[in-house]
Amino acid sequence: MKKILEHNKICAIMRNIPLEKTLDYAEAVYRGGVRMFEVAMNSDSAVRQIEIMRERFGGQVYVGAGTVTTPERCRMAWEAGAQFFLTPSATVGTMEFCRKYDIPLLPGVLTPTDVAVCLEYGYPIMKLFPAGDMPSSYIKSLKGPFDGTEYVAVGGVTADNIECFLNNGFIGVGIGSNLMPKEYVKNNQWEQASQYVGEIVRRVNGSDV
């Protein structure tokens, strides 16, 4: 995951995006400057969306599978071509699957116990979820006893607070429905969507994070 996150501070989370809008949505986000995507496996047509995006973008973007919480989802995401997995919790089965097949994984954590479990399985880079519900100092509290760990903020990230998360020590963020106004997706306003995402990317890249 470190290699993927080195040049990708923003991961676009695609949850419940209609299948027929998959490429329009992804291309708008891509034009805005985002190169890392998560397709939530508990969405309709998630497997097909991963396949479509891998076919369309090839090596231009990273396409991952999120909410990979069961053996069946692990298998389906892997066969669809997902390049990395994410979980909302420290799911041991997924960690074992990813270690077996050498799949980059961003396991979800919230508590010190979660962090300890992920470290036991060899995952020092984790997803703090739901990050928006925790105090801004929480990441520093986790890093105290767990030196060498890094975290990506997911849950509660918006266009307005994204820089706050990065300035507080997160190495990246995942942002879903807040990545662009919902009406842009509903009304197929893809040029406006691209410009909106582009402004977020410019702010992040231009900050001191």
Image (cartoon, rainbow, N blue to C red):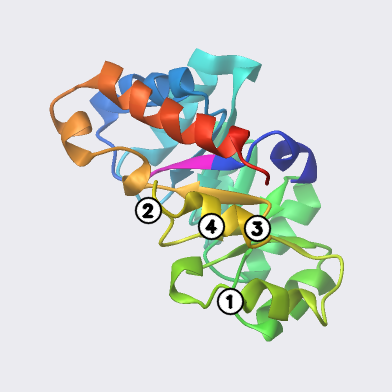
- Would you name the residue on which mark 2 appears? 42
- Mark identifier at residue 188: none
Q: Which residues are magenta?
A: 11-15
Q: Is residue 82 left or right of residue 198?
A: right
Residue at horizontal 86 percent and vertical 72 percent from the top: 147
> Which element is circle 2 on?
loop
Q: CA–CA distance between discs 3 and 1?
A: 14 Å
| First along the sequence among labels 4 and 1 | 1
In-front residue for pair 112/197: 197
Instruction: Name the secondary structure under disc 4.
Output: helix
Can residue 15 be seen at all in this image of the molecule? no
Q: Residue at x 43, y 37 (%)?
A: 47
Residue 133 % position (x, y):
44, 74
Q: Which mark is residue 164?
A: 4
| Three-letter code, disc 3 | Phe
Mark nearer the N terminus (3 vs 1)? 1
Mark toward the viewer: 2 or 3? 3
Mark 4 or mark 2, which is nearer the start of the sequence?
Answer: 2
What amino acid does circle 4 point to?
A: Cys
Report how far apart the C-alphas of labels 2 and 4 lie in the structure: 29 Å
Three-letter code, disc 2: Asn
Residue 194 vertical position relative to residue 205 in the rendered view, above or below: above
Residue at the spot of label 3:
170
Image location of residue 119, percent across then percent down: 81, 71
- Residue on which disc 1 sits: 110
Q: Are marks 2 and 1 in contact (CB under 8 Å)?
A: no
User: Where 128 falls versus 47 (above or below)?
Assistant: below
